[in-house]
Image (cartoon, rainbow, N blue to C red):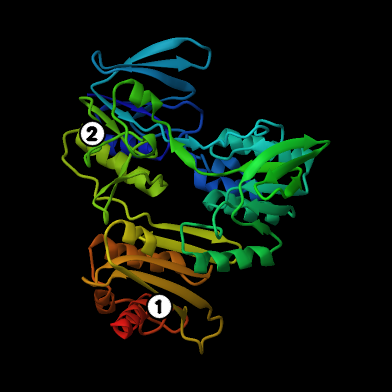
Amino acid sequence: MKFLIIGGSDAGIAAGLRAHELDPACDITLVLADAFPNYSICGLPFFLSGETPDWHSLAHRTEFPGIKLLPSHTAEHIDAAKKTVAARRADGTTIELPYDKLLIGTGARPVKPAIEGFDLPGVFPLHTMEDSFAVKAFLEQRQPKSAVIVGAGYIGLEMADALTHRGMQVTVASRTESILATVDTSLGRRVEAEMVQHGVVIRNQVEAQSLRQTGDQLVVTDTEGVELTAEMVLVAVGVKPNSELGAAAGITTGAKGALQVTRRMETNLPDVYAAGDCVETWHRILNRNTYMPLGTTAHKQGRTAAENALGHGREYAGSLGTQVVKLFNLVAARTGLREDEALKAGFDPFTNEVTVWDHKAYYPGAHELYVRVTGDRQSGKLLGAQLLGHKQSEVSKRVDIFAAALFHRMDVEELNELDLSYTPPLSSPWDPVQMGAQAWSRALNTQR
């Protein structure tokens, strides 16, 4: 069987590797537009901060067992009737690639604000290895001392940390009430305080309105008329799906223009699958598709697509939107629904926040951990959780406990039945996860 994969990032590589595991005789060809299969987008801020000095660490695998790679080949047309894909080589020539089964894993690209001046020298997006090389070259050649970052999501804030690590003065322009809008404002404010403590200037509830160059300086004017001056500007205001190739072939699109797929990752075209940041994602709590571009999701979707392409029936189990980010000495994490999202989805949500120690306070080095639990008032079902704490407080693993509970549709109270580990330097007899659950129940009962 000829299994053709378009896209060499998380979904494409995961699909190719799984297909080879299931059938070593499968003829697997992977078409990628650049020369960096399976590079780590999430690692780019650490490469640019200097903490991961060699970019090869982010794209260290250039060969994969059983997979024929076609780097620097851009897929331009899918003929579903003939079962072929036309791809253009770097030299401009075109080849035609036949397939029995096709997977589209074309990913996403950064949203580019429609503001004059974003094409000026010194203004950068950050999504690909080529983007990171351009930023790296500018940092080394120009030695800038200041930067404005437009956008306060994960990449924007991680880059604020990264450039501060390099000794630069950083200003972040955020259109939301507080930075890191994936968590509630109470936690976003604490993240903001941490960043300000490290010298980052935060401008909330503003958007970039114009950008101009004055000598060696770039001037970003925000919607309040404030001029933010720096030597470089990073734009990180989100991504949108690279769905045009599939849409042109006749695949239906949905949320944010992403390709629509079944839970088997099938498109409406026969023998054509799609996965990763170019597709809609089944949300396990909402029980519907949404657009949720995450690397962890892409890996699982690619694996699911490969199993179905090779005749092994499997449905994608769904995403919970579990995310985590380290910013300076803090870690913020979330999974499931925030209260506003749960309310919009038709639940009757109640959210409670509690502050606990990450381990027994009598053991040195204890840190405060903020735990926000959202559950349904009527059913008691867990709907979501958010955590914020010191980078040594096992925040990511504790949000994973909530994620596992959500996956299995547990009640908030059932968290107390989990047999979690305990030793004084690391936790308490009731883990902070369980303390958060108990505090939620007490607060709910007080309201009744």
Q: Which residue is mark 2?
A: 266
Q: Which quarter of the figure has residue 164?
A: bottom right
CB atoms of marks 1 and 2 within 8 Å: no
Circle number at residue 432: 1
Q: Is residue 400 left or right of residue 358?
A: left
Q: Which quarter of the figure has residue 113?
A: top right
Residue 39 image position (x, y, % from top left):
49, 39
Q: Residue extending furthest top? A: 93
Tell me which residue sits at (48%, 75%) in the image.
Answer: 369
Q: Secondary structure at mark 2?
A: loop
Circle number at residue 349: none
- Which sits earlier in the primary sequence, circle 1 or circle 2? 2
Q: Nearer the viewer, residue 444 or 11?
A: 444
Residue 375 image position (x, y, % from top left):
30, 69
- Mark 2 neighbour class, 10 Å CA radius: few under 14, some 14 to 19, many 20 or more: some
Q: Is residue 367 left or right of residue 439?
A: right
Is residue 21 visible in the rendered structure shown here?
Answer: no
- Mark 1 neighbour class, 10 Å CA radius: few under 14, some 14 to 19, many 20 or more: many
Residue 37 image position (x, y, % from top left):
46, 34
Tell me which residue sits at (33%, 77%) in the image.
Answer: 437
Tell me which residue sits at (16%, 34%) in the image.
Answer: 311
Q: Is residue 339 left or right of residue 26?
A: right
